[in-house]
Amino acid sequence: HTYNEIVGQAEQLQKTLELVDNLIMEQVNVDHVLFTGCGTSFYLAASAAKYYQTVTGQFASAVPASELFLHTSTTIVPGKKYFVVGISRSGTTSEILIALDHLKGNADIRTLAVTCNGDTPMAAATDQVIALDHITEKSVVMTQSFSNMLFALQVFAARQGRSTQNLTELKQVPELVEAALTLEDLTKGVAEDLTKKRFIFLGSGSYNGIAKEATLKLKEMTQTECESYSSLEFRHGPISIVDDSTVVILLTQLETKDYDQQLVMDIQKLGGYVLTIGPVAEGFVADHIIELTNTISDLNRHAIYVPYLQLLAYQRAMHLGFDPDQPRNLTQVVKL
Ligand code: F1P
């Protein structure tokens, strides 16, 4: 299932675009927009929050759903108005349900559910729902549900921010993802190199959540210990673990291009292998470059990186003999 769900995501993105573009939605006008979820859905929340703040100019942040009920005072300021966006593929994960229940009755908090199942306790517990019922993943690992729920929130944010430029770019994304998926072998060399043992994913800004999600995919599908950092943070300590068995996957952006090359060189100097995914400056050097289009801006390119990162994990899992559909110790829904 995992493979089909990865390579089928472009078609689903088109359906997601049409659905969210045509939704009747209330204008969000609050002090803070808070995105929340668990696991993959939390990493998605992290990217979505940074996107939302940039596009709408409203304060936005992300917290794991458990933090909302375990440490409410660190996430909610009494008397302030919030729009809480709960994200969950299943709509039944315990922490998200407990968090929403915990916030119930607070007149300052409006809620939105983003889910792949509109008929769940989560959808029933929120004021509004974006239900991507066309996403019916069978694999335990989340792949097209991640890209589609993130994309749905990008379209939602662009509409909230009345940003026609971003909406125009987002409308090109399904086609660009389709094109990216024809190049699925680009990650195979790294994925199948068993002399590489340690994987580090780096991304900054709204791409940090994508880097974290890439780490989770590799962990779930191959049980490889791997890490993720905000790109330049890697130089402040973690770089000490780099050796010739280390692969660093750097998600490059136009916005960070002046810093990306130096970072690559610092890692290579220590024997590390660097794969970059994203647009790069002319003359850019790395061990392997998957260059992505710069015809749309950094802000709207996320969904094009995602399939490569998912395929990397999938290809390595197959090469190591793991079943990517059934990751060890995991179930589709985690219940407390
Ligand atoms: C969230 C999640 C996934 C993880 C695993 C268990 O599920 O933690 O991120 O990969 O499958 O569930 P959900 O709340 O989005 O359904």
Image (cartoon, rainbow, N blue to C red):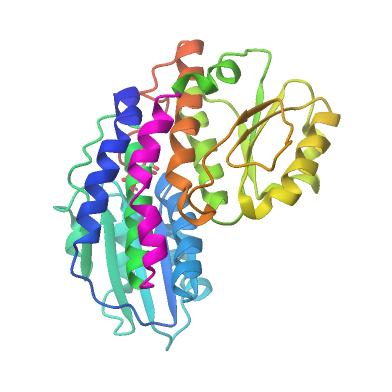
**Does the magenta-highlighted stretch encompass residue 10?**
no
201 and 165: which is toward the camera:
165
Give the residue at x 31% y 54%.
152
| Residue 35 placement: quadrant | bottom left
Q: Quadrant of residue 166?
A: bottom left
Residue 99 shows in the view: no
Give the quadrant of ligand 1: top left
Q: Which residues are magenta?
A: 161-183
Q: Can see residue 88?
A: yes
Residue at 43%, 69% in the rendered image: 34
Mostly what secondary structure, the magenta segment? helix
Q: Quadrant of the N terminus?
A: top left
Measured as percent of width and height from the top left, residue 253 is found at 61, 48
In the picture provided, is 301 more to the left or to the right than 238? Answer: left
Say whether residue 145 is left or right of residue 218. Answer: left
Q: Residue at x 33, y 73 (%)?
A: 103
Q: Residue at x 52, y 50 (%)?
A: 209
Query: Percent position (x, y) of residue 8?
Result: 29, 31
Residue 163 falls within the magenta-colored stretch: yes
Q: Residue furthest right?
A: 269
Which of the 4 image quadrants contains residue 125? bottom left
Q: Nearer the viewer, residue 185 or 200?
A: 185
Give the percent coordinates (x, y) of residue 249. 63, 34
In this image, 7 relative to 255: left or right?
left
Eyeballing the image, is 243 above or below 174? above
Q: Quick one: which residue is furthest to the bottom in this view? A: 79
Nearer to us in this view, 284 or 246:
284
